[in-house]
Image: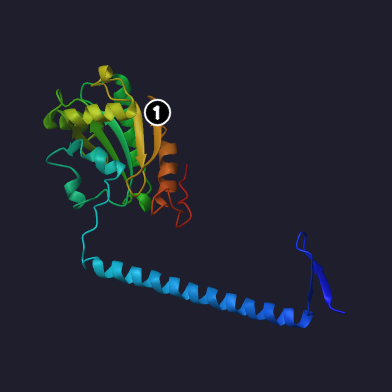
């Protein structure tokens, strides 16, 4: 007796199991074969499209310049003080360095004076192992009152000529932009904001410190930590942090 299969609403039909299996198997093979052929055709079309794109792209085409880093943007708002400055250390001495930035003016209050002295002490205390990879900058915030000579005289009198702390004179547009970025009241200028900024080795802002006092030990610990992030804080560190003795 043949196998009886019922389908609702369609009555009955008689099928031979062996024949049905062979037919189903052949149909499955044909379906798989068509799928493989379709996949191969699609892959060939994708490769052809990629090849056409490569041929359409001119050799040696110029890529768009990367956007300036946070530190590079900040530095465009200021300039080194002549005759001394970063030129003695090479063309781009801040490249691949951890950089701390504070703010100053020749006529600032006692709080700013104390903060700048403490900032200088931290710069002098950088361990020898990190000295070529960490930099401290002080940027002027009184472009109308502090020309390069006045700011240089203030710096030399306050922290001495041999300080590793580098002073830069800010310009009017840059100082206004800086105050806006830090949300520092423009009416409080030229008194410098009580802020220290830390930049990683790729020039990205990494940390911000606020307040009149400067925790030099904290800055040095953070310098040692940031130095391990050779590709910036967005990527894993390459080596264990330098053990700062603080």
- Graded by Cα atoms within 10 Å as few (under 14), some (14 to 19) or many (20 or more), the crowding at tag 1 reads few
Taking the view exactly as shown, the residue that stands out farthest to the right is 1
Taking the view exactly as shown, the residue that stands out farthest to the top is 187
Tell me where residue 171 appears, x and y as whole percent: 17, 31
**Tell me, what colour scheme is on the image?**
rainbow
Residue closest to the eye, 81 or 65: 65
Q: Helix or strand or loop: what does disc 1 sit on? A: strand
Q: Residue at x 34, y 68 (%)?
A: 49
**In this rendering, does residue 40 appear at all?**
yes
Quarter of the image where one finds residue 189: top left
Tell me where residue 43 appears, x and y as whole percent: 44, 72
Q: Is residue 17 above or below residue 149?
A: below
Q: Is residue 85 left or right of residue 120?
A: left
Q: Is residue 3 left or right of residue 57?
A: right
Tell me where residue 5 appears, x and y as whole percent: 80, 69
Q: Is residue 209 left or right of residue 154?
A: right
Q: Is residue 30 above or below residue 116?
A: below
Residue closest to the eye, 57 or 241: 57
Q: Is residue 77 above or below residue 46?
A: above
Residue closest to the eye, 152 or 69: 69
Tell me where residue 221 appears, x and y as whole percent: 44, 43
Q: Residue at x 63, y 77 (%)?
A: 27
Taking the view exactly as shown, the residue that stands out farthest to the front is 11
**In this rendering, does residue 163 appear at all?**
no
Quarter of the image where one finds residue 73: top left
Q: Residue at x 41, y 74 (%)?
A: 44
Task: Point out the image quarter for the N terminus.
Answer: bottom right
Residue closest to the eye, 5 or 244: 5
Q: How many marks?
A: 1
Identify the residue position indicated by label 1 in the image: 210
């Amino acid at each position: 007796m043949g196998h009886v299969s019922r389908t609702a609403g369609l009555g009955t039909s008689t099928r031979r199991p062996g024949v049905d299996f062979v037919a189903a198997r052949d149909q499955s093979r044909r379906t798989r074969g068509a799928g493989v052929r379709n996949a191969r055709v699609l892959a060939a079309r994708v490769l052809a499209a990629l090849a056409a794109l490569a041929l359409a792209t001119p050799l040696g085409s110029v890529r768009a310049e990367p956007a300036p880093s946070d530190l590079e943007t900040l530095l465009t708002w200021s300039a080194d003080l002549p005759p001394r400055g970063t030129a003695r250390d090479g063309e781009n001495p801040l490249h691949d360095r951890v950089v701390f930035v504070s703010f100053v003016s020749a006529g600032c209050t006692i709080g700013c004076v104390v903060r700048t002295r403490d900032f200088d002490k931290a710069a002098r205390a950088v361990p020898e192992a990190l000295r070529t990879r960490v930099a401290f900058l002080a940027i002027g915030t009184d472009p109308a009152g502090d020309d390069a000579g006045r700011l240089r005289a203030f710096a030399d009198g306050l922290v001495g000529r041999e300080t590793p702390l580098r002073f830069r004179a800010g310009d009017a547009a840059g100082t206004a932009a800086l105050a806006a970025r830090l949300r520092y009241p423009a009416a409080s200028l030229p008194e410098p904001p009580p802020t220290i900024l830390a930049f990683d080795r790729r020039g990205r802002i990494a940390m911000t410190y606020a307040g009149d006092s400067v925790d030099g030990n904290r800055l040095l610990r953070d310098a040692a930590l940031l130095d391990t992030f050779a590709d910036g804080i967005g990527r894993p560190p390459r080596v264990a942090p330098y053990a700062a003795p603080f």
